[in-house]
Image (tube, rainbow, N blue to C red):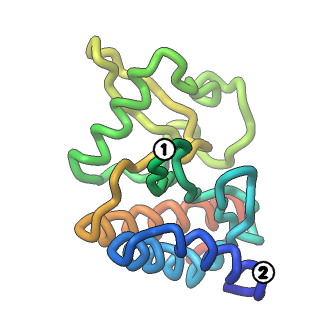
């Protein structure tokens, strides 16, 4: 973390978790920090953005209710090679009635840099239709476990490289 305030924000969040979840989330937060993503409180969640491109790559928070659970959301729209677990997450996102359809595929948006189809989630809805979900969105990764860490870090790194190249104009 860069500042004491950021460190306190993260420690406050982690203090709500059991030891196992603390270890998982701490490892992901440290990795995001190593890549230059800074935590910032946004409403009830903490968002991670990079100073060089100002795009969000991840969010963490807690669910509401009597037994709150941790939430981890990740932007991995520029990634194409991932496990069935992550394919299912994308397919579920495009199957929702209120899914965030990508407008950039039809040149109706200029929020993200780079070729539109290189930064949108491409999923198959429950009826088999291929759909494009807005790539600027971080999708919820339910019930993150220690066995997910390596793949999540791989997705973070791939998305980071894409964002640095296309949003910040820096080749890694």
Q: Position of residue 28 (x, y in %)?
A: 46, 73
Q: Residue at x 23, y 52 (%)?
A: 83
Q: Position of residue 114 (x, y in %)?
A: 62, 48
Q: Residue at x 63, y 25 (%)?
A: 103
Q: Residue at x 36, y 21 (%)?
A: 130
Above-or-below relation of 78 to 121:
below
Image-based side of 104 in relation to 71, left or right? right
Q: Position of residue 111 (x, y in %)?
A: 73, 41
At mark 1, the secondary structure is: strand
Q: For this rendering, which residue is in front, 4 or 153?
A: 4
At mark 2, the secondary structure is: helix
Asked whether disc 1 touches disc 2, contact meaning CB atoms under 8 Å apart, the reply is no
Q: Quadrant of the N terminus?
A: bottom right
- Count of numbered tags: 2
Rounded to the nearest angstrom, the CA distance separating label 1 from label 2 is 26 Å
Q: For this rendering, which residue is in front, 12 or 54?
A: 12
First in residue order: circle 1 vs circle 2: 2
Q: Residue at x 36, y 30 (%)?
A: 92
The residue under label 2 is 5
The residue under label 1 is 139
């Amino acid at each position: 973390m860069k500042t004491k305030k950021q460190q306190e924000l993260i420690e406050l969040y982690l203090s709500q978790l059991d030891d196992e979840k603390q270890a998982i989330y701490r490892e992901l937060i440290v990795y995001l920090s190593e890549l230059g993503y800074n935590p910032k409180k946004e409403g009830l969640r903490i968002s991670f953005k990079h100073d060089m491109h100002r795009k969000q790559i991840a969010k963490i928070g807690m669910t509401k209710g009597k037994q709150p659970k941790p939430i981890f959301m990740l932007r991995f729209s520029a990634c194409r090679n991932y496990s069935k677990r992550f394919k299912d997450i994308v397919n579920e996102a495009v199957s929702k009635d209120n899914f965030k359809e990508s407008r950039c595929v039809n040149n109706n948006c200029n929020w993200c840099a780079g070729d539109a189809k290189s930064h949108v989630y491409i999923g198959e809805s429950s009826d088999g239709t291929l759909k494009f979900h807005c790539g600027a969105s971080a999708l919820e990764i339910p019930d993150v476990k220690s066995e997910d860490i390596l793949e999540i870090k791989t997705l973070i790194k791939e998305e980071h490289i894409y964002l640095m190249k296309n949003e910040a104009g820096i080749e890694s």
